Amino acid sequence: MANRKPAIWCADLVVPVSPTEPQAQATAEGDGPAAANEIWDGAAATVRLAGAANEVLAFQLVVEKRAGRVESIDLDAAGLVGGLFLNVPVAQGERVCDDVLVPLAFGPVDDAVAAITRKAPRFTGRGRWTFTVELYIPPGTPAGGRDLALTVRAGGAAHRVNVALKVYAFELPAAATCTADLNNYSVVPGAGVEEQDLDYAASIKLTEAYFRLARDHRALFHLLPYSQAGRITGRYAPLLAGRGRDRRVVDFEPFDTFWGGLLDGSAFAGSRGGEHPIEYLYLPVNGNWPATFEKYPSPGYWHEYRQVISQIARHLSERGWRGTKFEVFFNHKARWKFFPWDMDEIRFDRDNYATADYGRAALEAAAVAPDAQIINRIDSSWIFDRTAFEPWAKDIGLWVVNRGSHSEAPDASAHVRKLGGAVWFYGGAGPIAAADRLDNLRWSWIAWGREADGFCWWNGIGFGSWEKVGPGTGHCIYPGQRFGIDGPLPSIRLKVLHRGQQDHAYLTVLTQRTGSRASADAILGQTIGASGREDWYQRGEGVEAGGADILAGSSTGKAWNTAGREVWANARARLAEAIEKA
């Protein structure tokens, strides 16, 4: 059959487009995704999109090598806001897979693409260039159809890509409706970059850029300010002096200067997510700060611990930083040989009791300033199903539970929320080389279905160089310094998470308009096969499949777990229709 595959085509972000491998071979049924896919009509050279006001839509623009050198990309956005990125591949064993997104300006792009490519990791066999295009529908945009157009000039020829956009008759709230936590254990600018000799102001500006990037994607950037040994990075904590009864904060300036813009919201000026304080922030409290662990468990140790936390609580109240929940969290494991307990991913009762003692003491100390939101955060993954029912569970404000453990404990989650605590579940950002990016999308849907308050992507900026494959290198935010950008770069997986977060907002808006979850449950039951909370949990089953395993196999029989891309898109469209009618 004749090769009808166009030289320029488009695809959804959840579809991995290989920079080297043939994307799809022609078959008797057609010519694969280059000819037609969920959003692309190759015969009409048209991308079909739909979204609400205050929503960001994104898709991939693919230019095959045979089209020639990409010279320019122009967007007629009809008054909407456009964004353009070059997809940069990351090595994954013998393969390379797109993930890093480097921003471009519309217009001539040939020199910029060449410069980025020179700085990017090298690979052989390039078959195409792929770009990510964003369209932001500003608040107040009237409902109705819009005809937009991309003009791609490549190899001396101009190619028009039509964009048929439908704007729904509702608007998404500015703030995220679900906490998508990007958790990190590293000093920005992040893994793979040596700690910079930046002046203090530049360091603050760079850190705030990571928080802003997360908020622009309806997510929360999180930065644990101490090492496994309890060592504090100086700029993250107030300065202490004295011992025993004299142990005290002598200077809050380092803490206030570094975190102040995040705590009063000014660091988010101009963000689409809103100029409001960061929702959660780790305190530097751990087994060796503010009390020196060599004194444990003497009365003097606990006096130091309580006295400094009381000072911190008063200070937060006096500064008016009441919009942030300040977490007391212990990221200690016995195998690291600094502390005798596993207080992260707790499995044994003795570790529970130690964590409860620290948490209870923190709340007693913070009681001097009740309007300062100091809370205890705990990871009780292995035994969450019974720890949640312990008498001291009321003292925990945030439970972060392994996604597999959480999937088996719907009653524990419900009980914790009844006590006033929040529940998140956690896991990794998903492999870059996954068969598709559906798992990145599904986290927000699972959180809504399980009636959880959010979820946590472990280690958002990774360990080690992002050019090397290995444990902990599943970055979803990349350092931009390599490309001459003094700040962070998003990944395609972060963009897909953003879409999932917007889907969560659809679910929330429909629930608010109808007064219950029943309408949304009915739609999800008819599409992805989850008609209520029990369908989202795996009570008595193995945990759901993730990443590349989604369509290959699973240890649970839940229908939503193996639902394909078109099913999730259909569910979203049905939700939008119901919102407009509500």
Image: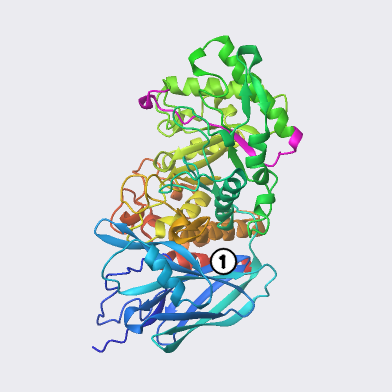
- Say if 16 sits above or below 445 in the image: below
Q: Amino acid at mark 1?
A: Val
For mark 1, does the 10 Å Cα neighbourhood hold few (<14), some (14 to 19), or many (20 or more) residues? many
x, y percentage for residue 258? 63, 41
**Residue 342, quarter of the rendered image:** top left
Residue 495 appears left or right of 65: right
**Residue 514, quarter of the rendered image:** bottom right
In magenta, the rendered stretch is: 318-338
Give the camera-side residue of 189 and 176: 189
Q: Is residue 384 magenta?
A: no
Q: Residue at x 49, y 55 (%)?
A: 445
x, y percentage for residue 148? 56, 82
Q: Quadrant of the N terminus?
A: bottom left
Q: Residue at x 49, y 35 (%)?
A: 412
Q: Is residue 528 visible?
A: no
- Say if 507 sits above or below 170 in the image: above
Judging from the image, what secondary structure is the residue with disc 1 in?
Answer: strand
